[in-house]
Image: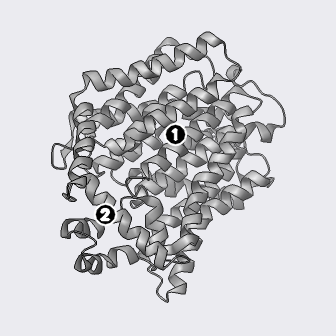
Amino acid sequence: MSTPAKQSSLSVNLRSLLPALFLLTYPSATLLIHGGGSALSIAAVMVSLVLLALPRNWGGLRPLQWDRVDVALCIATASPFLAVLLGGAWHGAVVASTLDSPSRFFAAAPLFLVLRRALPRTLAWADLSFALAGLAALGILLIAPRDWGFGRLSSQFLNPIHFGDIALVMGALSVLSLNWWRKDRLAVRVVKMAGLFAGLAASLITGSRGGWIAIPVVAAMILYARSRGKSRRWKVLLPAAIVAILVGVYVFSPTARDRVGDVSSDIVQYTHGNKDTPLGIRLQLYEAAARIVENHPLLGLGGDGFRDSMESFAKSGLLTPAAAQLGRGETHNQLFAYMTDYGIVGGLALLSIYVVPGAIFWRRLNAPTVPARRAALMGLTFVVAFWIFGLTVETFDLKVTVSFYASVIAILAAASAYADRRGQYHDVQREPLQ
């Protein structure tokens, strides 16, 4: 029979193990298991709510002390839900299905509040999570891919665009996590570099060319952030290495060359009247969205307003039948999606989930600890990449991508802010992962 001391020790170990497993496995579970990422995020949020309500029953957490970061992030994550609710009420028809995805932004707030109170040795379990996700993405495409048509490969349940974008950003976070919490051993460095190339390869295989726009932008941002205080030699070698990687991908990957060539071909065809190319259809939908925003600026058309407008636009000749058919699925631009249905209010609410976390990460680039600064750079990279992804596709039309974005933001925001809770510089590189 276990003694009370042993039972207490077992309870503490279990309590430490649960958040550790979540941080380590969440990105990979999103890609590997249908509904796995959403289920894990919902479970994490429910546990977080219990911890916030009963903090004394959970050891290892510091008292919750609200500050501007907590308030700003909670307001930002609540904004999309409130905008959708307001838009529906204004138009006299709250579409219940439209509330599900935006509510998942807000659901990540409790997770952030709990993780921010956790000890660094718990947060450090996220160290290999992004590398494992990049490797998992490539593994899926090599072992059990699904052909979504036109040679576009992805997982069995996540379309090539979203899958490729997530794989790409996981590769970027993998390489940025080098020496995140301590000086990595050779084996760990190999895994993280492999995660980078696996993420890039997976993105190329899916052919999700819209996400590739993020590569030079993110590379330039990282270069700027990491170059402050570095030697002139470092400032020359790093951009040269980035350019070499990009040129190498273009030269040695027929897929990359073909997809870049497709963009040029689409532009030429569009100028000659053929508007039903992939790029041409997007341009048509953007024009239709701009007209809706112009005519309904404040609160848009209401839930599913853009989709329901496709028939009238096709009859008027503004859209081709092919564009109208695809427009019933999405606008292919995340900002237009919110602004057509919920107006300027919706647009500002959407921007808040990029701008507020981005500003938090930007300020934490000068944090007193190396792990906090690195988490801030990773978070800023993640936000900027997803914003760019949203220029050519609705990143948040799937509940899984909403949960993924919000949960990763919560994890990285907590890791970048933990030094504030400790009140002094703390060298976590001396703390073992446990």
Residue at x 26% of width, y 79% of height: 316
Up/down of 184 relative to 336, above or below: above
**Picture quarter containing residue 183?**
top right
Q: Residue furthest bottom?
A: 92
Locate residue 393: give its quadrant.
Answer: bottom left
Residue 206 spot, x, y in % from top left: 27, 40
| Residue 28 in sight | no
Q: CA distance from mark 1 to mark 2?
A: 45 Å
As shown in the figure, which amino acid type bears the numbered disc 1? Leu
| Image position of 386 (left or right of 198) | right
Q: Position of residue 392 (x, y in %)?
A: 38, 53
Residue 276: image location, x then y, percent? 20, 59
Which of disc 2 and disc 1 is earlier in sequence?
Answer: 1
Please tell me whether mark 2 sits on a helix, a strand or a loop: helix
Does residue 288 lie above or below 198 as drawn?
Answer: below
Mark number displayed over residue 284: 2
User: Label for residue 21?
Assistant: 1
Q: Is residue 161 left or right of residue 47?
A: left
Residue sticking out furthest to the front = 272
Farthest residue, direction right: 423
Q: Residues within 10 Å of mark 2 (few under 14, many from 20)?
A: many
Of the residues shown, which amino acid type is indicated by label 2?
Gln
Q: Nearer the viewer, residue 402 or 339?
A: 339
Q: Which residue is drawn at the image coordinates 62% and 52% (left, top)?
A: 355
Of 346 and 298, nearer the camera is 298
| Image height of 322 relative to 147, above or below | below
Q: Please tell me the numbered disc located at residue 415.
A: none
Q: Secondary structure at mark 1?
A: helix
| Residue 71 placement: quadrant | bottom right
The quadrant the N terminus occupies is top right
